[in-house]
Amino acid sequence: MFFIGAFGDWGGVWDILPVNVTGNVMFDYFFTLVLSFGVLSMMVGWLFNIMTRS
């Protein structure tokens, strides 16, 4: 969940970049963004499911 916390400010995205998937800085940056958006969208969808169920 540290992706969400670091996503608050753009500087924080660079802080968690040592994921180091490809060795290429821009590819790692893109990968981290995609991962962050994936977690965010999953949480939004989960919340939406709960709210629409009632």
Image (cartoon, helix red, strand yellow):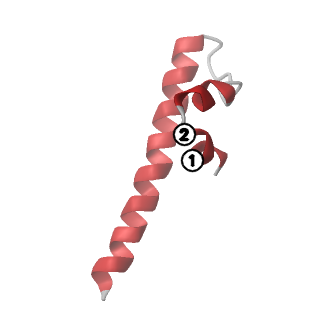
Image position of 6 with respect to 50: above or below: above
Q: Amino acid at mark 2?
A: Phe
Residue lying at the far right in this picture: please name it: 18
Residue lying at the far bottom in this picture: please name it: 54
The disc at residue 7 is: 2
The picture quadrant where one finds residue 22 is top right
Position of 53 with respect to 7 (left or right) is left
Write the residue at 54% across / 39% down: 7
Q: Quadrant of the C terminus?
A: bottom left
Foreground pick, 36 / 24 = 36
Name the secondary structure under disc 1. Answer: helix
Q: CA distance from mark 1 to mark 2?
A: 5 Å
Name the secondary structure under disc 2. Answer: loop
Position of 47 with respect to 21 (left or right) is left
Image position of 49 with respect to 27: above or below: below
The picture quadrant where one finds residue 44 is bottom left
Q: Are marks 1 and 2 in contact (CB under 8 Å)?
A: yes
The picture quadrant where one finds residue 12 is top right
Residue lying at the far top in this picture: please name it: 24
Position of 23 with respect to 37 (left or right) is right
Percent position (x, y) of residue 50?
A: 38, 78
Position of 3 with respect to 51 (left or right) is right
Percent position (x, y) of residue 31?
A: 52, 28
Q: Amino acid at mark 1?
A: Ile
Percent position (x, y) of residue 14?
A: 62, 24
Residue identified by numbered label 1: 4
The disc at residue 48 is: none
How many other residues sit within 10 Å of disc 2, few (<14), some (14-19) or many (≥20)? Answer: some
